[in-house]
Image (cartoon, grey):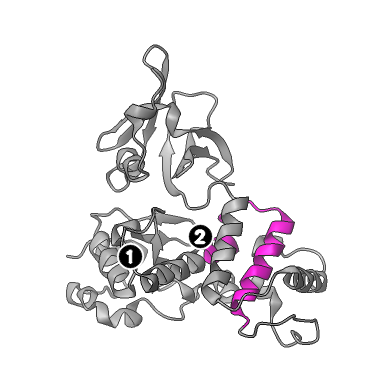
Amino acid sequence: MTTTSEISYALAEELGLPDPSQYGIFQSGTDGVEKLCPQLGYIVDIQNGWDRNLKLQTLDDWRLIKKIKLFFASKAPVNEVDEANDISSIPTLVGHKMGRLMLKRKLFLDAPAGTDQSTKETSIEFDYNQAVHEVMTGSYLLKSRDALMLGALQLRVDLDENKKYTEKSLKGVDLHKYEPKSFITGNREDWRLDLIKALQTLPEESDKILRMSDYVDYLKSRCPLYQSTWIFVKQKEDSKLPEELFVAINATGVYFADPITKEAIMRIPFTQICSWGHSVAAASLVTGNMTKNHEHRLITRQVHSISCRSTLCKCKINLEECCPR
């Protein structure tokens, strides 16, 4: 049978993305929570968990990557949020009404040396589509003005012509698809007018890839947890932290985040991490120095797929050199 890592690697190669190891298959349940599937997990087992009466794809089906559009549908919304914000930009496999699999980027590292410009642009476009999806589905805490600016930047990407737009020229455009559902409050017409005003403040840019980069860069500047690897964990040793939480790891450090709001509770810079390790079902992070330290013991089912050690290593941090003695 085919594992999720085999599928994600093959799909990333088929799409022309650099370093396929940075991508993975994510499962979204009926609660909207997206979780990285275990790298060694079998696709058919995951689908079987959705609905035992659902017809499963066979091994031969999954290996025919050239038929990607047959299974990872080009248009496959499963709820009103997806319909409003067009989830179809992300390669998606819909499993009846019980679940969905998506190819997403799980690690955000620099492209390998020698990557050609075309591949870099493909990567930027993929990152942009993933960022839009995550913003629209409420993955990040945003202020209203930031949500408005992201909507304007997204609209600028979709508009083909390079000119100043007015309320009249945009009359036929559904501008509400550029508003995250969590911000749909009050007068919808006010949102439309504010979005047009925000769009008019943006500089003209004829290159669509650069317009996509502007969106990603703005999101990165407003959300410290953007471009993180997320791991759901349980812990009992630190009374200052909730028992269940997310560990988010990106280039700026390791974060502990609220399991519901995903708001950062604690940030641990890489320079404060003295050692790390993991077993089959738990990971350990030790902070401090050789004379005084504190261990964070984290229980998680995801340790075998994205262990803290492998993630930290891939962030190119030499912990031994950074650790204060």
* Mark in the foreground, 2 or 1: 1
In the image, residue 147 above or below residue 70: above
Q: Residues within 10 Å of mark 1 (few under 14, many from 20)?
A: few
Q: Quadrant of residue 220?
A: bottom right
- Image point (69%, 74%), residue name: 176
The residue under the point 55% across, 61% down is: 216
Q: Give coordinates of residue 233: x percent, y percent.
A: 42, 39
- Magenta residue span: 131-159
Q: Residue at x 74, y 58 (%)?
A: 145
Which residue carries the number 1 mark? 115
The residue carrying pointer 2 sits among few (fewer than 14), some (14 to 19) or many (20 or more) residues within 10 Å by Cα, namely few
Q: Is residue 201 left or right of residue 246?
A: right
- Secondary structure at numbered mark 1: loop
Which amino acid lies under the numbered mark 1 shown in the image of this protein? Thr
Whole-number angstrom distance, CA of label 2 to CA of label 1 = 35 Å
Image-quadrant location for residue 294: top left
Which disc number belongs to residue 32? 2
Q: Main secondary structure of the magenta part?
A: helix
- Say left or right for 182 vs 324: right
- Most extreme residue toward the front, as rendered? 114
Residue 89: tell me if it is visible: yes
Identify the residue at horizontal 46%, vertical 49% (top origin).
228
Which type of secondary structure does the marked residue at label 2 adopt? loop
Picture coordinates of residue 143, whole percent (x, y):
70, 53
- Whether residue 186 appears in magenta in the rendering, the answer is no
**Can the viewer see residue 285?**
no
Give the answer, above or below, for where 254 lies relative to 38. above
Q: Is residue 315 above or below residue 272?
A: below
Q: Dividing the picture into quarters, in which one does residue 163 lie?
A: bottom right
Q: Name the image quarter holding the C terminus.
A: top left
Asked if 33 appears above or below 320 in the picture, the reply is below
